[in-house]
Image: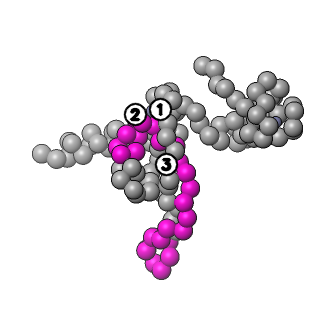
Amino acid sequence: MTRRIACPSCGETEDLAGSPSPEGIVIRCGCCDTSWLRDAVPETCATCGGTELETRPRALTQYSRGTQLSIVGMTEIMLCRVCDAEMLEWSKTGRAVPPTYRPAAIDPEAAKERAEGEEDDRRLTP
Ligand SMILES: [Zn+2]
Ligand SMILES: [Zn+2]
């Protein structure tokens, strides 16, 4: 699998060097000395390996006054058109992705747990 990596600062695609760090692979540009995390923005789905990814708004919430959740801001999250199809449809109706949702696009375990959870529900329902 070939990834097309370009420097976010100057657009250089050749003179780049990668080195491992605790947060992931860090890429450094030999032209302008900018460095960034290669995996900060996934280009392929972690569950199916597909490239059908979409960025959707996601709500950031915090608890205030007891158990009342309030939206304190928005961030962006990657969803896979295949693995996160349900959530993608839901978010397209104008709602933000809930902060508790773990996208399959970046978390294969979450997709597995959801699939297993659905099976449990079916078993419990007569
Ligand atoms: Zn650069
Ligand atoms: Zn996927």
Which sits earlier in the primary sequence, circle 1 or circle 2? 1
* Residue 70 rendering spot, x and y as whole percentages: 47, 71
Question: Could you tell me which secondary element the residue under label 1 belongs to?
Answer: loop
Are the residues flagged by discs 2 and 3 in contact, CB closer than 8 Å? no
Q: Is residue 87 visible?
A: no
* Residue 8 rendering spot, x and y as whole percentages: 74, 39
Q: Which residue is mark 3?
A: 56
Q: Which residue is mark 2?
A: 82
The answer to which quarter of the image holds residue 96 is bottom left
Q: Which mark is residue 52?
A: 1
Disc 3 marks a residue whose amino acid type is Arg
Disc 2 marks a residue whose amino acid type is Val
Residue lying at 20% horizontally and 46% vertically, measured from the top left: 124
Q: Is mark 1 within 8 Å of ligand 2?
A: yes
Residue lying at 43% horizontally and 74% vertically, measured from the top left: 68
Question: Could you tell me which secondary element the residue under label 2 belongs to?
Answer: loop
**Which of 119/62 is in front?**
62
**Which of 90/120 is in front?**
90
